[in-house]
Image: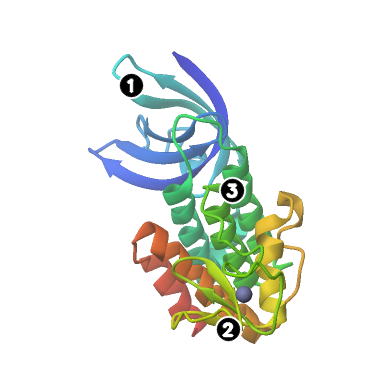
Amino acid sequence: MTLRTDGIIIREQTTGEQDRLVTVLTRDMGLIKAFVNGGRNPKNKNVSATDLLCYADYTIDKTKKDVYIIKEATAKQVFFNLRNDITNLSLAQYLAELARDFSPKEERCDEFLSLLLNSLHLLCTGTKSDLLIKTVTELRYCCIAGFMPSIVGCNSCGEYEKGSMYLNPKKGTLFCESCNTDTEGVKLTAGMLYALRHICFSTPDKIYSFSLGEDSLLALGAITERYVKSLTFKQYKTLDFYKTMRSI
Ligand SMILES: [Zn+2]
């Protein structure tokens, strides 16, 4: 069976002397692992379109044993600028890892794919801060995978906003000042609470459209990071490297 879809390479591994195995986040079939025959031969015309973080149109054969093989690849966007900046590149690799951890298999993945493509595009253009891109993408991946934190109102009394609000970054639960008894609750500034709700409830085209001071953004980013880790149980080396480079 031959399939045609667009997608982005989010992981690459070498297998044998000539072949590569890549993980592709495809629009039509979600996450798939596929071989690129002759993928280590630089003369192979499909090589550059199957590099890490390359977005391309793919023609993929699915064998009777459910093995996927990329037959043709035509690059649509290579995010070349990312390779000029090691900090942005490490963040991009981390976001690709999130895409791998949160995206489903064997089903359409429009929103998962768009989220990664948009975040990489913004990283390349430099029109939004990398911290904002990181925080939005982390939280939004949790949301679209079905793990939106419970932030409409206080999880006890239901108030939308009452005094200072506290969020448990592991459970994603929100409490007002009167109801909060959670020792792990992190106090939110009004800006942080607004940003949290904006990221969770906005339409996909609006999620990056807000501003927040660097201190609040750092504090919010620490929360979204902990929330991601509470769901994936992973320590991300790419994230650690990004934070080292960023001195945060
Ligand atoms: Zn309350």
Q: Quadrant of ligand 1?
A: bottom right
Picture disc at residue 78? 3
Three-letter code for the amino acid on which mark 1 is drawn: Asp
Q: Quadrant of residue 41?
A: top left
Using the image, tell me which numbered label, if any, was put on residue 98: none
Residue placed furthest toward the left: 16
Q: Earlier in the sequence, mark 3 or mark 1?
A: 1
The residue tagged 1 is 66
Say whether residue 234 is left or right of residue 217: left
Query: Of residues 218 and 155, which is closer to you in this image?
Result: 155
Q: Is residue 76 visible?
A: yes
Q: Secondary structure at mark 2?
A: strand
Of the two numbered discs 2 and 1 on the same chain, state the one appearing first in sequence: 1
Within the image, what quadrant is residue 213 found in? bottom right
Q: At which x and y percent is residue 229?
A: 40, 65
Q: Amino acid at mark 3?
A: Val
Contact, CB < 8 Å: mark 2 with mark 1? no
